[in-house]
Amino acid sequence: MDKLQAEDARYLKRKVKRGSLDVHPTEKALVVQYEVEATILGEMGDPMVGERKECQKIIRLKSLNANTDITTLARRVVEECRLIHPSKLPEVEQLLFYLQNRKKPGNGYIMGEWNNVICVFTMKVTHSSKPCEPGTPYIHPETALGALARVLREDWKQSVDMATTIIYVFFCFSSFSQFHGLVTHYKIGALCMNITEHELKRYDLWQDELQKKQKDPDNQNVKKEHEKALKKYQGLLSKQEQLLRVALYLLLNLAEDTRTELKMRNKNIVHMLVKTLDREDEELLVLVVSFLKKLSIFLENKNDMAETHAVEKLARLLACEHENLLNTTLRLLLNLSFDTGLRSQMVQAGLIHKLSLMLADEKQGQLCMCILYHISVDDRFKSMFAYTDCIPQLMKMLFECGESHMEPELISFCINLAANKRNAQVICEGNGLKMLMKRGLKLKDVLIMKMIRNLSQHDGPTKNLFIDYVGDLAAQMGAEEREEYVIECLGTLANLTIPDLDWELVLKEYNLVPYLKDHLKPGSAEDDLILEVVIMIGTVSMDDSCAATMAKSGIIPALIELLNAQQEDDEFVCQIVYVLYQMVVHQATRDVIIKDTQAPAYLIDLMHDKNAEIRKVCNNTLDIIAEYDNECERKIQSEKFRWHNSQWLEMVENRAMGDDGEPFMFGDDGEAFMHNGDILERPDLFYTAGELIVGQGVDWTSIPIPWRLLWGGWTGLLSPICSEGAGFNRPNM
């Protein structure tokens, strides 16, 4: 077969495929990689035998020195070597430049020489777009940057100064968005990430070494070694921080592209930046905090900051005197304060006290207030403000506004704080409440009145302070006032559940009953105002004479009509039922509700509402009604019975209607056990002391077992009825 092939072979085809270019590792030479493919063709031209071989050609450049014209030499190399395509000319220039400046083994450049080379090189790069004078060597920017990137990639560990200088060159380009692609092409961003990570590890090693040498301070030798190491460490640290600053600044510029930023995040940029917050160099810290602030707008980065406890390290920076660093830190904290978990970290780090001290700062006070406002949103932290100087400062700012425009952050912050009982006491100390009422009523300020309304909700000494202002608040109920303003005034009055307050006198003097009745009509006003009217009626109905006045005015039917219209709104339903509860407590209004309205029927329907608060209010109201009306009591107990045993009763009813009856459903004469009447009207069932017993002459054993179980389950429902609903307060939805 081999002989046949040898005889048939007539032609040899040789094909050369160009490969990559590189520099020789030790000599001043270029290495050209290429591939030779040899194929033996038959007489018909078809390939018979083929073989590939990878080869390389070394082009030695003995004449290359520091004064060689790189452009001319590169052109000559390309012309004389057919293995290098003319399009590779810029790459050849780059490699030649690298060889020209590469240090010789055992006799490298000192740092000053490197700086001179790179500085001259940088000038050539930055001026490469200008026309050259005749005879002046010209370097393409791509060639120059490629050479710099190669030097940085291979030798950055050898010299911090060299790495800093080269990265600075690329940083200059990164300052312009149009050059980001060029910087990214040479993978400088990834290289800077690696350099930063390496330097942070070196920093940890230095710290460990210093701690080891500091263990025995009494030993003079150890002490001298520590002082020497500390001096060396400070010099190294200064250079390292310069390197970190330029590297991180370059990364910050490249992070304009969100895709590049995502790559950085995947390489733990947040962890590196948070770790750098331990440094003392203020310029470096400004850069790091600015970078974190930019990253913090994305959820993933924010979560990384939470995991690394960045807030704890940022809290340390609030004591600095560097204005730019302080401002940037506060802006980062403001971004982070939107997260509940990070707000908790801020409180643990003592930020409430630190930021409260800075509220008076004209430049930083607004940022501090915004952060504190976010913290005050969480009920867990409201009480902590009472133990700082925050509230007195806020009250001072509030009163200094006069009649001028008030910052929304200021009043919003105060509204949040007023929702806490201890804070409310601090706010009302001295003339606090008096000044607030004066401003709120004079300027018709809705937000001030909202703050006052929050203050009025707290039981104790704070609520009693409002007695002097009941008349002023009641006088605001008028058609000419803005609705949102009236809502706050009415809500404040509704909160004043004070036993000594003569509500009957207030209703008469300010003619509030017609106003309240008119605003109970569905659609007469906004739902928020109507709801406040209902709550107000519930408050005044605690007084017996006021409840009677309300009943005579026809407010109860209006409430029932409103209940029917707002039956889908749980807040409305709950508050209306609470009003009915307050009214059935009083003898004067109880009979009106039971006999003259459909309120009991509505309450029975609401006994089993899905809302637990509604069920609670409803059952307390029905308990009182059942105590005073036998017919209502029977209906209520019947409904409770049916609800408790609804599934079993449904099963019994379905089987009774079927063709095949069960034996226990009928007596001996075939008569249905349940008859057609109400089970509760059976004459052989009696009640005693809240228990169900079988009447005299009834054979208990003759009663079918399911009915025994039914009565057993029912017995527990017939507990003694509460007479007055003692201890029952206004429902909170």
Image (tube, rainbow, N blue to C red):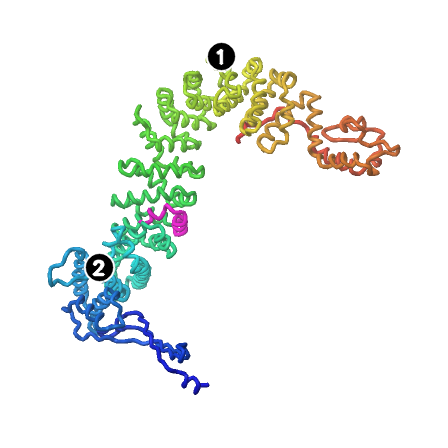
Q: Give the quadrant of residue 376.
A: top left
Q: Are marks 1 and 2 in contact (CB under 8 Å)?
A: no
Other residues around mark 2 within 10 Å, as few (<14) / some (14–19) / many (≥20)? many
Other residues around mark 1 within 10 Å, as few (<14) / some (14–19) / many (≥20)? few
Q: Residue 497: where, in percent of width, then height?
A: 50, 23
- Looking at the rendering, the stretch of residues picked out in magenta corresponds to 291-308
Q: Residue 591: where, in percent of width, then height?
A: 64, 17
The residue tagged with tag 1: helix, strand or loop? helix
Residue where numbered disc 2 is placed: 141
Up the image or down, 84 lies above or below 527; here it is: below
Q: Does residue 203 appear anywhere in the picture?
A: no
Name the residue nearer the viewer: 55 or 215.
Answer: 55
Q: Residue furthest bottom?
A: 3
Up the image or down, 166 lies above or below 255; here it is: below
Q: Residue 499: where, in percent of width, then height?
A: 51, 21
Name the residue nearer the viewer: 257 or 559.
Answer: 257
Label 1 vs 2, first from the N-terminus = 2
Residue depicted at 22% across the width and 75% down the height: 60
Q: Which mark is residue 74?
A: none
Residue where numbered disc 1 is placed: 508
Q: Amino acid at mark 2?
A: Pro
Name the residue nearer the viewer: 640 or 42.
Answer: 42
Q: Give the quadrant of residue 652.
A: top right
Residue 624 vs residue 169: left or right?
right
Q: Amino acid at mark 1?
A: Lys
Residue 416: say if magenta: no
Up the image or down, 413 lies above or below 354; here it is: above
Residue depicted at 39% across the width and 55% down the height: 266
Residue 137 vs residue 429: left or right?
left
- Observer-side mark, 1 or 2, equals 2
The residue tagged with tag 2: helix, strand or loop? helix
Q: Give the quadrant of residue 560.
A: top right
